[in-house]
Image: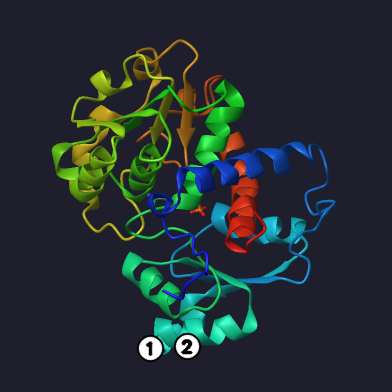
Amino acid sequence: MIPDVRHFLDISSLSTEELRAILDEAHARKAARLDWPKAKRDEDAPLDGYALAMIFQKNSTRTRVSFEIGMHQLGGTSIVLNANDTQLGRGETVEDTARVLSRMVDAVMIRANSHQDVVDFSAASDVPVINGLTDLSHPCQIIADIVTIEERMGDIAGKTIAWLGDGNNVCTSFVHAAEKLDFKLRIATPAAYAARGQEIAAAKAASADVEVGTDARAAIAGADVVVTDTWVSMGDTDKDARMAAFPPFSVNEQMMQLASKDALFLHCLPAHRGEEVTDAVMDGPQSGVWDEAENRIHAQKAVLLWCLGKL
Ligand code: CP
Ligand code: NVA
C-alpha cells in the first residue's frame, strides 16, 4: 500500500476518532442542506476540481447514485465504469488499471466480486481507493446505517443492534464497527451461514460486545435496532439451500414485537419483500429504510472528504 494515501477499505482499519469524524461530517453535511435541490453544490464545495472514478463488477443503484450525486454536491465530478466495458474485462490487471487511473482521477471507488482485488488495486494506487462492496464487506453501507441510527436515537453507544439472517458482507462491516464504537451487536444466523469466524474473533479480541447464535428470537429480544439483508447476495450460487435455511430469520411484525417498543428497522436494500422482511415491516412506522438509503449520500461525502484529506 502506498504510504500516506487514505484508502477506505474496511471500518476495521479506521481509528475510532477517524470513524467518529466521518460520522459527524455526514450528520453536519446533511443538516446544512435540508430541503435543498439534490444537485445544488454545498456552500464550501470542498472537492472543486476533484474527479472520482467508480468501477462496478456488480449491479448497483444506491452506491452508484449516492457517490455520483455526492461527488457533485462536493463540487467534484465522477466517471462510472462497468468493469466489463473496461480493459479489466479483457484481462488488464487490477494493478495496471490502478496505476493508470491514479494519473487520471483523484480517487477510485470499486465494487468488486473479490475483496482481494480491491486490496491489490489499493496497493498499486497513488490515490485513495474506496470499497463500494465486496464479497467480504460493505463499509460505506454501515456508515450510512450508523448515521440513520444516530439521527433517530442519538449516539449509538449503549444501543443494542440485532442482525438477523445471513452472516454476509454487510454483517461483517457491522462487526467491524462494533470494534470501534460501544454498541452491542447480537447476530442470529442459520449455523451454515454464520458471520465470519475470523472477524468475530478479531472483534472479541478488540473487546467488542458481539454475540453470535442461531436463535433469531433471542437476538431480537429488547433490541433497539433490527437489521437484516437479502438471503442471497450477489455472487451466491446456493439459492435453493439458502431459501430453505433462512425463513425462521424473516423479520415480520410478530418478530418486531419482541424488540424494544420503538425499535428501528433497517435494511441496506434491495429488499426481497416476503422473504427476509415483510411489507408490513418495510412500510411500517418503525422502518428507517428510506432515510438509510438517503443517508448513503451523506455517508459517501464524508468518506470522500476523509480519503482526500479534508477531514
Ligand atoms: N445498499 C446498496 O449498496 O445498494 P446498491 O446495491 O443498490 O448499491
Ligand atoms: N449482501 C448484499 C448487499 C447488497 C447491497 C449483496 O452483497 O448482494
Q: Is residue 211 above or below residue 205?
A: above
Splitting the image into 4 quarters, where does residue 257 fall? top left
Q: Is residue 300 above or below residue 277?
A: below
Frontmost residue, 33 versus 47: 47
Q: Residue at x 53, y 48 (%)?
A: 18
Q: CA distance from mark 1 to mark 2?
A: 6 Å
Frontmost residue, 182 versus 299: 182
The amino acid at mark 1 is Gly
Q: Quickly name the residue at label 1.
A: 91
Q: Residue at x 21, y 54 (%)?
A: 238
Q: Quickly name the residue at label 2.
A: 87
Q: Is residue 258 above or below residue 248?
A: above
> How far across and down, in percent of the image, does residue 24 sit?
62, 39
Q: Residue at x 78, y 62 (%)?
A: 75
> How far across and down, in percent of the image, does residue 70 sit?
68, 55
> How far across and down, in percent of the image, does residue 166 sit?
28, 41
